[in-house]
Image (tube, rainbow, N blue to C red):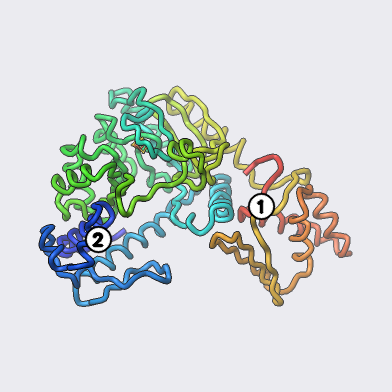
Amino acid sequence: MGRFAKKEDEYIIGWIKRFMEYETMIPGFHEEEVSDPEAALKKYGFPLTAKDVSFYPNLDNIREMRPVYPESGASKYAAFMSAKLGYRDELKKICVPTHPAMRKWHKRQAGRCMAVLGARTDALIHLPFTIELSDGCSVGCEFCGLAAGKLKSVFRHTEENGRLFRKSLWKIRELIGPAVEQATMYFASEPLDNPDYELFLRDFEEIYEDNIPQITTAASMRHAGRLHKLLKEINEEGNTIYRFSVLSQKMAEDIFREFSPEELVYTELLPQFDAAPGKSFANVGRRAEKEGVYDNTISCVSGFIVNFANRTVRLTTPTPADHEHPTGQIILDRMEFTDDESLIECIKEMIKKHMMNIISPKDRVRLRQGLSVKISENGVITVTNGKGSEFTIDPQGKDTFYDKMFALFQSGYLTKREIVSELTKDYTEPVMTDTFHYCINRMWELGLLELESGKI
Ligand code: SF4
């Protein structure tokens, strides 16, 4: 992937980005800036003009930012933001496993998430594999979407552990495919809690051909020295991002003092404190449990999370948070391993047990709750969820059985056998039975059906 910005544009982009960060994190800055833009820019020491930070309001919710003055620095910033969005789209394509059963399962989970979570799911990458280098987290953010427990242990880079880590990475890629190279080395954990993070990073990059795993850290000021070095690498490449969670206005100001705008060009600052004008909290995890309001997920993994500190592997996929799934993820399985061989055996067993890609004739299915179906004159089927997601199925011509098939899907749980036998009543050709089985499997593959057994 190419750079998100040309080296020579990073200075102006960095400053415009910092201006945006003031808007989202410094209370009162926006009001000052609106009343007298040039005076506010001068007061806060921005080497920018008001034209550099003038964008048309995004009333139509389009992806691209539209600069009011295209000849200003604003155009460079808008192009940079588009390149980052393009990177996310690209990442979604790269993250597809090559293991045949997992590939189908992974695609179905992406469809299911679209059906239940809506268009905002667009931002989910569905990583097929990710790593935790510690058990628990030392930070304890009150908004933690994954409700990470207290830090219990870290996986130090001893000779033996280093060997286990490297062998595991090799074998997991062999099994699942190159998509695993997009793994991060944190999930419900703080990456920099591990003092040997940089040593594991070196191993990771050696095995996964120079892919730099993304970092999200809530401890940027505690580890500023380490981050200055780590940032050099992503800034050199210019095609990946880091994220700093910002937990207070003071922390924002400390970060602004510690790291120059150019140094943080490829690092997103997430305003995660109540006083921040642009605060963004998902109703999931610790905060949701405290407030009793659930809705959303921050999980981006449809696959395996390997925790090397407590030697466990879990299979997980996102879901809207609720009482049953407070962290917005369905944890399908969790197994313990002792070495790289047993880790691979655990993963193979979970694939076999959970990645069922064909519905059996006895499985009871129905259309996923909350979906509506419309079949047009020319037979095109549109399934919507009222949350911005739309699935279009074009069977290339009007087949009347689709009306009946969807009516059966909507009538409550029926076995696949019952649905097929209902549909075949209208046909004499035996070949149609196979067609019906195929169509039901296809709807399942797209994530549109749910099974009474709860299998996903
Ligand atoms: S959000 Fe991250 S840093 Fe904060 S408690 Fe959760 S895992 Fe730890």
Of badges 2 and 1, the one in the foreground is: 2
Q: Residue at x 62, y 35 (%)?
A: 353
Image quarter for residue 324?
Answer: top right
Q: Which quarter of the rendering shows the N terminus? A: bottom left
Q: Position of residue 247 (x, y in %)?
A: 29, 42
The reply to whether residue 348 is visible in this rendering is: yes
**Viewer-proximal residue, 429 or 377?**
377
Q: Is mark 2 within 8 Å of ligand 1?
A: no
- The residue beneath circle 1 is 369
Q: Position of residue 46 (x, y in %)?
A: 13, 61
Report the amino acid beneath label 2. His
Report the amino acid beneath label 1. Gln
- The residue beneath circle 2 is 30
Task: Rate crowding at label 1 as few (under 14), some (14 to 19) or many (20 or more) other CA atoms within 10 Å.
Answer: some
Circle 1: element type: loop
Q: Position of residue 142 (x, y in %)?
A: 37, 36
Mark 2 or mark 1: name the one nearer the start of the chain. 2
User: How far is mark 2 from mark 1, CA to CA?
Assistant: 42 Å
Circle 2: element type: helix
The reply to whether residue 177 is visible in this rendering is: no
**Viewer-proximal residue, 208 or 234?**
234
